[in-house]
Amino acid sequence: MKTRAVIFDLDSTILRLDVDWRKVIIEVEKFFPDKCPDIDDLKSSLAYFVEANLNYKKLPLKKRKRFLKMLERMEIEGAEKSGILPFSRCAIGSLSRNYKLGVVSGNSVYAVRVSLKKFGLLKRFGAVIGRENSAKVKPAPDGIILALKKLRVKPCEAVFVGDNIYDVIAAKAAGTKAIAVLSGNTKRKALAAANPDRIIKNLGSLEGVLKEIFQ
């Protein structure tokens, strides 16, 4: 079936959030003194680390709100200092002429919007999904499924693009095609083990791949 939509991960796929990870660790430990987050785990997926390792939903309501506000503040600071990755602006501009576009991120939706707006990309996306918008973050498919509904496309009509094995797992669970991009910290061998439909070096080759194998 013809591809009608392309949905992206955000951090290390379109741009790179400049998050102060050491500061995040210090802040997390204020709420969870018995936890000692590994910086590589946070870089891989802050949202998944929080969901899988921190029982924050059982915090008293006021404390939980402070915790989530802290995470959002860290992410917004990273969004404001973010840098766009090579080929992202050109690829998204070109793709937006022929495909519906979406973003699914484990970051707060406000931070996602701040970062996309910074580079003039926000208006290109018909669906912008953040951590608050779905019950579970990647590798669960919830965010991608919500984006599909907002874009009004079937899973078989969409491709999800991300730099992390969680992105590939989530895409397959949602029923979309999965393209892994080597713009993050995950090595080719690890991405290949997750069995994406294609691995690309950067977004510069994305449109060609879509026309080649997904039409």
Image (tube, grey):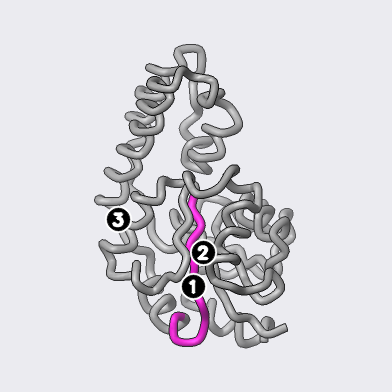
Q: Residue at x 66, y 65 (%)?
A: 178
152 in relation to 132, above or below: below
Q: CA distance from mark 1 to mark 2?
A: 8 Å
| Residue positioned most to the top | 34
Residue 88: say if magenta.
Answer: no
- Taking depth in this image into account, of 169 and 194 the one nearest to the observer is 169
Circles 1 and 2 in contact, beta carbons < 8 Å: yes
**What is the crowding at mark 2: few (fewer than 14 residues within 10 Å), some, or many (at least 20)?**
many
Q: Is residue 76 left or right of residue 2?
A: left
- Residue 81: x and y in percent read 25, 50
- Residue 40: x and y in percent read 50, 36
* Quadrant where the N terminus is found in the figure: bottom right
- Taking depth in this image into account, of 109 and 211 the one nearest to the observer is 109
Please identify, in this view, whether the residue under mark 1 or under mark 2 is nearer the observer.
1
The kind of secondary structure element at disc 3 is helix
Q: CA distance from mark 1 to mark 3?
A: 17 Å
**What is the crowding at mark 3: few (fewer than 14 residues within 10 Å), some, or many (at least 20)?**
some
* Dot label at residue 101: 1
User: Where does label 2 land, which residue?
Assistant: 8
- Taking depth in this image into account, of 213 and 171 the one nearest to the observer is 171
The mark nearer the N terminus, 3 or 2, is 2
